[in-house]
Amino acid sequence: MTRAKIAGIGYYVPEKVVTNQDLEKVMDTTDEWIQERTGITQRRYGNKYEETTATMGARAAEKAIERAGITKEDVDFIIFATLSPDYYFPGCGVLMQRELGITKTEIGALDIRNQCSGFIYGLSVADQFVRTGMYKNVLLVGAETHSYGLDFSTRGRNVTVIFGDGAGAVVLQPTESDQEGILTTNMHSDGTYAEKLAYINPGCHGGYHFEHNLNEEVDFGYPDVEYGGLFLTQHMMDHAQTFPNMEGQFVFKMAVQKFPEAIHEALQTAGLEKEDIDMFIPHQANLRISQFVQRQLGLKDEQVWNNIQRYGNTTAASIPIALSEAVEEGAVKEGDLVCLAAFGSGFTWGAALLRW
Ligand code: UT7
């Protein structure tokens, strides 16, 4: 039976390190608060004019492609997951294709918008394409440049201190061996709480969800004209409505419930037990969430890869960055059962099990 395996993996993080102490200088926060609630001590930020979500994705992709022992021209499908794309459209898939210098047009480039679960969703999609024999070298990238769009005033502190920039990439290839590759993936969604963690404006919602789903009157300052003017208004900018918002405690509670559910489902599907897991690589949402899930699974510290302390939450990039680091540092060995899981905005969540 054909399975997909990760044949090459790599990551890229920008050089600029921003510590909690750096953030203390621009907003009312403290290193103590951030570390206690999230475990984060520093994160990386991209450099404008030099780094974007697509270019960082390309840097990570170059490493993954090299390690897979292929060339850029061998890539036959691109999947790009991000919530902080360079442009509203077109997506980062084609921008990264250009950045990589891939001129071949026989390949497709698919953009995935599943936030923190973007990599798991992308892995699942890639897995299906490889299993069916459709593609032989799928390049899957998760990348984010959060720092360009966050609110650095005290008003935005609950969100801003958490997020960081970076990219991770994998190349997926077919394998006939039953000793390696992706064993199972699952994906879940529940739109009930879409606005609990969301970046709403600018957007083409026209106020609909506030009137109909949320029963909330929100003034977006729409102009009194027949057509247009709804995507971005001066009012939105003046009233700080153009930043991500999060009901942190609500998200936290859902996360600690859904992470274990998705993992247990994956184990059950694969006919395995939690004791079989060698390495758990959670989406780096918050160290406290990862520790909670670790306890639920009964895993030792050395069986969980946490790097949120150094990079913050890099959303779609966090799993491939963490997996890449774990592999580079020899913490994931051939034959290991690796468990990946994520939960985030949407809400969307999911898990994957793979034999390294
Ligand atoms: O990856 C995507 C999924 N996202 C997540 O999984 C995030 C899940 N949620 C969380 O990680 C946590 O909810 C946070 C770390 C975001 C926040 O921690 P919390 O313990 O839930 O804090 P809170 O939002 O309930 O705020 C508690 C207090 C408030 O002050 P008052 O009202 O008690 O006086 C906030 O204003 O902490 C204040 N606060 C801060 N203080 C200093 C919020 N952010 C900050 C800050 N620095 N950065």
Image (spheres, rainbow, N blue to C red):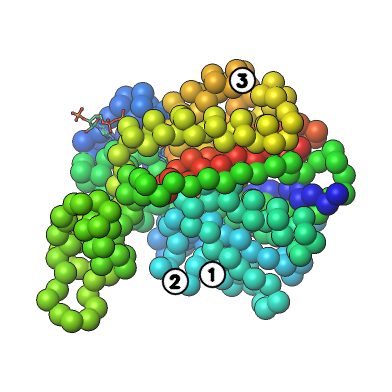
Asked if residue 166 can be seen in this view, the reply is: no
In the rendered image of this protein, does residue 289 appear above or below residue 6? above
Name the quadrant of the C terminus.
top right
How many labels were placed on the picture?
3
Query: What kind of element bears circle 1?
Result: helix
Could you tell me how far apart the alpha carbons at marks 1 and 2 are, in whole angstroms?
10 Å
Which is nearer the eye, 174 or 263?
263
Which residue is denoted by mark 2 in the rendering? 89
User: Do tag 2 and tag 3 residues touch (Cβ < 8 Å)?
Assistant: no
In the rendered image of this protein, does residue 21 appear above or below residue 346? above
The residue drawn where x is 21% and y is 36% is: 28
Mark 3 beta carbon near ligand 1 (under 8 Å) = no
Query: What kind of element bears circle 2?
Result: loop
The residue drawn where x is 48% and y is 23% is: 292
Q: Picture quarter containing residue 297?
A: top right
What percent of the width, then of the height, locates residue 36? Answer: 36, 23
- Which mark sits nearer the N-terminus, 3 or 1? 1
